[in-house]
């Protein structure tokens, strides 16, 4: 049977942009940028975008299209010993999918809570005590049905889209999600800029702190933000590239996806800080004492802001939380597609069987583990370790393998250039083969050194157990990859279908 393909070029770009635009833009970028030098962060950010993000996007699209397979099959076709790289990426995608869905389900609840501001006067208390019922740090026994059911629905919807196929499911849903997201988020940005204090917020956000960008952790933050936000380094863009038609342009698509995503990131930064400026204006709490990232930003600061909005408060809340849901949903679809396509390609399973077993398995783990009173801590730790020691290690490992060990860069360069208007050359391969791996090696070394002395987040007793869990997840993903590759050593890949 012929491999599934995208229906049109626009459809492919929308799907890739749908994967890129996600929670990373809305709730990760503004906070990461603010905490790492504000306006000055744009320097490491742009360096990481141009030396790692876009070159890697081009590389992954080309690998997918050239070898016509999701990550494990593509790497196996590059070299029989390289298959573990693909499974490593699959493992990271599985971990990300399992916790990413959780945030979407919370955002869906909060879109509903926005109507009538059901969180009451004290949003922090509401989140922790009422919604998450966070209590004893070791308590995993209590499963919260409200959270669990919403999460299960997120999974059902995701698996339904993936089950419908590349063109009728993924592509068709992106054609709805992206315009919807532009509408919702556009309205939100406009409304946020009309608020008192918005300008002060923007000043706080963009004021450069040049001292800050000297530290290694700022550069690690920039590189890991780029991998996460562009969905590169964990098989997504290889998988999406594998559904490209042979003659499709690669480099222009990569730039389009990269620029759209960064545009979304800057816009989110503007909206978030305009609104934080308003909160400072209303409450007198200075901007630098607020929470700008992750759970605290989305589920505590935003509800507090919505409580003080002079008009259309409920609408603002619905816009914000639905933006999170829509942006997150298209990303979740892309990440679950990675393991689904991997077993489809590698074991010859039908899409339905792969969705049911692999997607269903991920859903079960997610629904069993996270709607508990400790879901929040689990989520934070997993997010930190998989991003900094999963993606940030796996991505350079595959680059080094492809460029240096297997010496495939010439072939891939020519393959991309043959159908692309903008050609890549020495700069591209230098960025990939030298700048990115070297930068990441130095950065990771310095960062691990810092981490050994001081952990991220809470320094309480339970924290160390969670940290051990984090290392286990990061290390386990590599172990899984090696085991899969060894088990499949003698099993050849299916015949190479060229068109
Ligand atoms: N690019 C996504 C974002 O910015 C990252 C992502 C994609 C995360 C897919 C998980 C799954 O949010
Ligand atoms: Na993104």
Image (cartoon, rainbow, N blue to C red):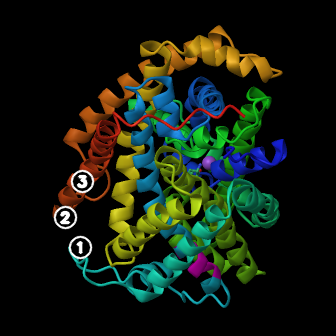
SS for tag 3? Answer: helix
Residue range in magenta is: 106-111
Label 3 crowd bin: few (<14), some (14–19), many (20+), radius 10 Å: some
Callout count: 3
Residue pointed to by mark 3 = 467
Horizontal and vertical percent for residue 422?
80, 20
The span from disc 1 to disc 2 (Cα, nearest Å) is 7 Å
Q: Within the image, what quadrant is residue 330 found in?
A: bottom right
Give the vertical position of 128 relative to 433 (above or below). Answer: below
Instruction: Look at 71% across and 83% down and name the residue there.
Output: 314
Horizontal and vertical percent for residue 157?
61, 72
Is residue 413 something that shows in the picture? Answer: yes
The span from disc 1 to disc 3 (Cα, nearest Å) is 13 Å
Q: Which residue is at the front of the view, 80 or 403? A: 80
Pick whichever of labels 1 and 3 is earlier in the sequence: 1
Residue pointed to by mark 2 = 462
Instruction: Look at 73% across and 45% down and name the residue there.
Output: 5
Q: Which residue is at the front of the view, 178 or 373? A: 178
Residue pointed to by mark 1 = 137
Label 2 crowd bin: few (<14), some (14–19), many (20+), radius 10 Å: few
User: Are the two marked residues, 1 and 2, in contact with CB atoms closer than 8 angstroms?
Assistant: yes
Instruction: Answer whether residue 351 is magenta in the image.
Output: no
SS for tag 2? Answer: helix
């Amino acid at each position: 049977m012929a491999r599934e393909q995208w229906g049109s070029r626009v459809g492919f770009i929308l799907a890739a942009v749908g994967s890129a635009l996600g929670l990373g833009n809305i709730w990760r970028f503004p906070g990461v940028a603010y905490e790492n030098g504000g306006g000055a962060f744009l320097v490491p950010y742009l360096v990481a975008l141009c030396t790692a993000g876009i070159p890697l996007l081009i590389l992954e699209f080309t690998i997918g299209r050239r070898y016509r397979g999701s990550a494990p099959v593509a790497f196996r076709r590059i070299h029989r010993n390289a298959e573990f790289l693909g499974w490593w990426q699959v493992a990271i995608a599985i971990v990300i999918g399992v916790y990413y869905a959780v945030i979407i389900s919370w955002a869906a609840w909060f879109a509903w809570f926005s109507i009538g501001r059901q969180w009451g006067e004290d949003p922090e208390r509401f989140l922790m005590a009422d919604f998450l019922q966070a209590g004893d740090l070791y308590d995993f026994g209590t499963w919260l049905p409200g959270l669990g059911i919403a999460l299960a629905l997120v999974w059902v919807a995701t698996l339904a889209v993936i089950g419908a196929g590349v063109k009728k499911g993924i592509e068709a849903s992106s054609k709805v999600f992206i315009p919807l997201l532009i509408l919702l988020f556009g309205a939100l940005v406009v409304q946020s800029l009309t608020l008192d204090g918005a300008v002060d917020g923007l000043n706080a956000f963009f004021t450069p702190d040049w001292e800050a960008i000297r530290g290694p952790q700022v550069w690690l933050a920039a590189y890991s933000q780029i991998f996460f936000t562009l969905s590169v380094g964990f098989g997504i863009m290889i998988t999406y590239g594998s559904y490209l038609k042979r003659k499709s342009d690669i480099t222009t698509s990569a730039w389009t996806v990269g620029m759209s995503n960064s545009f979304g990131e800057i816009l989110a930064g503007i909206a978030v800080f305009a609104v934080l400026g308003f909160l400072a204006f209303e409450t007198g709490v200075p901007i630098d004492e607020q929470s700008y990232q992750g759970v605290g930003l989305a589920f505590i600061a935003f509800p507090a802001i919505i409580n003080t909005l002079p008009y259309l408060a409920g609408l603002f809340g619905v816009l914000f939380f639905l933006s999170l849901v829509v942006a997150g949903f298209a990303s979740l679809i892309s990440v679950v597609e990675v393991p689904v396509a991997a077993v489809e390609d590698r074991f010859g399973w039908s899409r339905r069987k792969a969705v049911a077993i692999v997607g269903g398995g991920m859903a079960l783990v997610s629904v069993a583990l996270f709607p508990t009173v400790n879901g929040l801590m689990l989520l934070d730790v997993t997010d930190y370790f998989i991003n900094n020691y999963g993606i940030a290690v796996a991505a350079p490992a595959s680059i080094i393998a492809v460029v240096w060990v297997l010496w495939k860069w010439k072939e891939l360069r020519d393959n991309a250039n043959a159908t692309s208007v903008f050609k890549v050359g020495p700069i591209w391969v230098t960025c990939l083969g030298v700048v990115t791996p070297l930068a990441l090696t130095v950065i990771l070394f310095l960062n691990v050194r810092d981490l050994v002395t001081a952990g991220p987040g809470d320094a309480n007793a339970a924290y160390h157990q969670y940290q051990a869990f984090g290392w286990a997840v990061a290390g386990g993903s590599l172990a899984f990859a090696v085991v899969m590759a060894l088990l499949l050593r003698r099993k050849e890949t299916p015949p190479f279908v060229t068109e």
